[in-house]
């Protein structure tokens, strides 16, 4: 994996506008991005109550990460720990922590914490390995 990120550079993250990689953050003041991350195109991040993405995290395209929900009023920081991977088209809800080296399968709805090193998938996401 080290070769993949040999030339990684922190992208400019404009408020509410796509980055050069076509992902977007609203409320950038609450957004913290680690080193050597990979966020897929068309991913949306709302960091109103805090979103932290640690080093070496991979997020697939078309994901949604919310620190606030206007549907049910939930709010809280989201933390994606070092080396975790979030599959394409997944949604991470407010107040959730995905542990280090955990994997979330594609098209999952993560509405509770995912422990480090585990594999979760589904709607809602549950432990599968």
Image (spheres, rainbow, N blue to C red):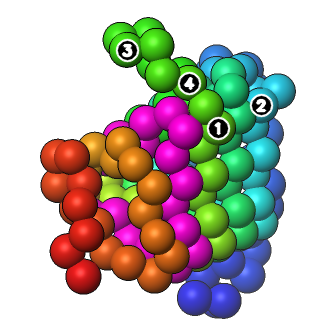
Query: Distance of mark 2 from mark 3, alpha carbons?
Result: 21 Å
Query: Distance of mark 1 from mark 2, alpha carbons?
Result: 9 Å
Point out the frontmost of discs 4 and 2: 4
Asked whether the beta carbons under mark 4 and mark 2 sit within 8 Å of each other, the answer is no
Query: Distance of mark 4 from mark 1, alpha carbons?
Result: 7 Å
- Which residues lie in the magenta part? 90-105
**Going 51% across and 33% down the picture, which residue do you hit?**
94
In the image shown, does 76 or 86 lie closer to the viewer? 76
Asked whether the beta carbons under mark 1 and mark 2 sit within 8 Å of each other, the answer is yes
Residue 115 percent location from the top left of the image: 46, 70
Q: Earlier in the sequence, mark 1 or mark 2?
A: 2
Residue corresponding to mark 4:
75
Residue 77, label in figure? 1
Check disc 4 and report its element: helix, strand or loop: loop
Residue 110 percent location from the top left of the image: 35, 47
Residue 117 located left or right of residue 37 = left
Q: For residue 49: magenta? A: no
Task: Locate the N terminus by quadrant.
Answer: bottom right
Residue 73 percent location from the top left of the image: 46, 13
Residue 30, label in figure? 2
């Amino acid at each position: 994996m080290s070769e993949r990120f040999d030339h990684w550079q922190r992208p400019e993250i404009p408020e509410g506008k796509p980055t050069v990689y076509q992902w977007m953050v609203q409320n950038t003041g609450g957004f913290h991005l680690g080193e050597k991350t990979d966020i897929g195109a068309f991913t949306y991040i709302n960091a109103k109550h805090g979103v932290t993405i640690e080093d070496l995290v991979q997020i697939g395209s078309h994901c949604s990460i919310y620190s606030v929900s206007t549907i049910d009023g939930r709010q809280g920081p989201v933390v994606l720990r070092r080396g975790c991977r979030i599959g394409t088209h997944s949604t991470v809800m407010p107040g959730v922590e995905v542990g280090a080296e955990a994997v979330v399968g594609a098209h999952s709805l993560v509405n509770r914490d995912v422990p480090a090193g585990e594999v979760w998938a589904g709607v809602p996401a549950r432990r599968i390995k």
